[in-house]
Image (cartoon, rainbow, N blue to C red):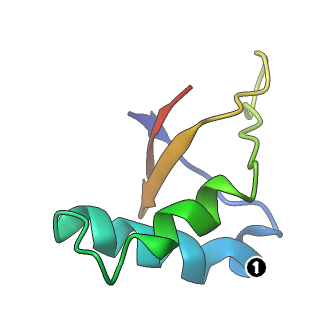
Amino acid sequence: MVRFEPSDEWERFRPLLEAQAEAHRLGFPEDKVSAVKAVMDLHLELHPVHEGPVIRPMLIYIEGHEARFRT
């Protein structure tokens, strides 16, 4: 888990990431899994605030100021 600080682009993706987080919390019910695919299809990148490589997660969950992801 890492600290997440949204950029100006965050608002554009917030609804999809919130829907995916809800699907995760509910155990991925069939009617919610489309949110997971929609987020994966975005090919999001996480850019470290300081130094470090860009992270291109396969799966990402952002809730509040915390991000969890798999690469």
Most foreground residue, 44 or 2: 44
For the N terminus, which image quadrant?
A: top left
- The residue to which callout 1 is attached is 12
Left or right, residue 57 beside residue 25:
right
Q: In which quarter of the image is residue 49?
A: top right
Number of numbered labels in the structure image: 1
Q: Which residue is found at the position 74% from the left and 49% from the top?
A: 44
Badge 1 element: helix
Seen as rendered, the residue at the extreme top is: 52
Q: Quadrant of residue 14?
A: bottom right
Q: Which residue is found at the position 76% from the left and 15% from the top?
A: 52
Q: Is residue 65 visible?
A: no
> In the rendered structure, which amino acid carries the disc numbered 1?
Arg
* x, y percent for residue 20: 43, 68
In the rendered image, the vertical position of residue 13 relative to residue 47, given as above or below: below
In the rendered image, the vertical position of residue 49 relative to residue 64, given as above or below: above
Classed neighbour count for the residue bearing mark 1: other residues with Cα under 10 Å, few (<14), some (14–19), many (≥20): few
Q: Which residue is found at the position 57% from the left and 76% from the top?
A: 16
Q: In which quarter of the image is residue 9?
A: bottom right
In the rendered image, the vertical position of residue 58 relative to residue 41, given as above or below: above
Q: Can residue 70 be seen in this view?
A: yes
* x, y percent for residue 67: 46, 46
